[in-house]
Image (cartoon, rainbow, N blue to C red):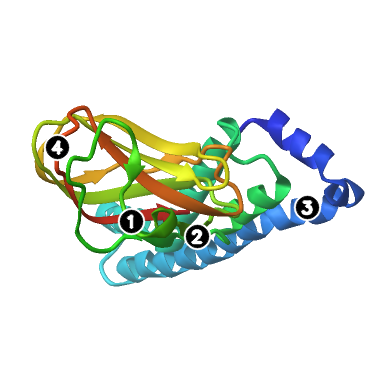
């Protein structure tokens, strides 16, 4: 992990600077929890191995392998490894910039949230070659999204991309039209499920903000049908 960036976060947070010990204790709380839970798992599995030794001689390699497999697969350990890796990536790429975000990500306080950006079929007849709102209602039917302490997002779209394309889709911050996400070269046509996979949040996606969905085509007369679009944030 980029220690230099973490040091800069601490320097910028007067509360943390006044009591570094409390900050470090907060960071380590989850680590301590994992150690205690993991220790209990190890103890339980060692008991299993000991029982094998009592009822048929020394524990076999299979017994030992099973103990290791159970420990490795324990959900809480997997979750902790995932959060640690996410935190490291977010610090290194600059997505996490404050101690609050660092602690929230490490501790698992940032739960995955789902936002429905579009929930019914919308046909964009003669969509045009410049971006237009996908939902037909006032203000592009803006959606309120909470990005607080989040570091990643994922957009999943179902659509019937009728005609030629390629098509473009983007997500804007409503207050100033800052582009949070854009794919301007969707060359697929027909019924499609499009998934961005997990992406790092841009700096503009911070706090509670209104967002708008827009689309376009390289052929003005195209008539794509957008069916359902959701965004996941974590």
70 horizontally vs 85: left or right:
left
Q: Which residue is mark 2?
A: 144
Label 3: how many residues lie within 10 Å, few (<14), some (14-19) or many (20+)?
some
Circle 4 SS class: loop
Question: In front: mark 2 or mark 3?
Answer: 2
Who is closer to the viewer here, 191 or 39? 191
Q: CA distance from mark 4 to mark 1?
A: 23 Å
Label 4: how many residues lie within 10 Å, few (<14), some (14-19) or many (20+)?
many
Q: Residue 65 location in percent, x, y?
A: 31, 52
Circle 1 SS class: strand
Q: Which residue is mark 1?
A: 230
Which of the two discs, 3 and 1, labels the residue nearer the N terminus? 3
Q: CA distance from mark 3 to mark 1?
A: 36 Å
Q: Which residue is mark 3?
A: 23
Q: CA distance from mark 3 to mark 4?
A: 55 Å
Question: In front: mark 4 or mark 2?
Answer: 4
Q: Residue at x 52, y 54 (%)?
A: 210
Q: Residue 145 location in percent, x, y?
A: 50, 57
């Amino acid at each position: 992990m980029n220690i230099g960036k973490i040091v800069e976060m601490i320097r910028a947070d007067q509360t943390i600077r006044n009591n570094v010990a409390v900050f470090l204790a907060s960071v380590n709380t989850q680590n301590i929890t994992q150690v205690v839970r993991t220790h209990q798992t190890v103890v339980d599995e060692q008991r299993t191995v000991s029982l094998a030794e009592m009822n048929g001689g020394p524990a076999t390699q299979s017994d030992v392998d099973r103990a290791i497999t159970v420990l490795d697969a324990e959900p809480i350990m997997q979750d902790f490894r995932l959060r640690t890796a996410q935190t490291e990536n977010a610090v290194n790429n600059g997505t996490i910039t404050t101690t609050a975000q660092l602690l929230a990500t490490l501790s698992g306080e940032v739960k995955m949230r789902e936002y429905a950006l579009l929930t019914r079929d919308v046909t964009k007849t003669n969509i045009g070659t410049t971006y237009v709102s996908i939902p037909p209602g006032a203000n592009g039917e803006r959606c309120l999204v909470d990005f607080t302490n989040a570091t990643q997002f994922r957009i999943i779209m179902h659509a019937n991309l009728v005609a030629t394309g390629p098509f473009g889709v983007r997500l804007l911050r409503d207050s100033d039209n800052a582009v949070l996400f854009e794919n301007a070269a969707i060359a697929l046509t027909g019924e499609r499920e499009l998934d961005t996979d997990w992406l790092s949040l841009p700096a503009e996606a911070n706090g509670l903000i209104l967002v708008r969905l827009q689309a376009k085509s390289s052929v003005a007369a195209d008539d794509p049908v957008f069916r359902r679009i959701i965004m996941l944030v974590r």
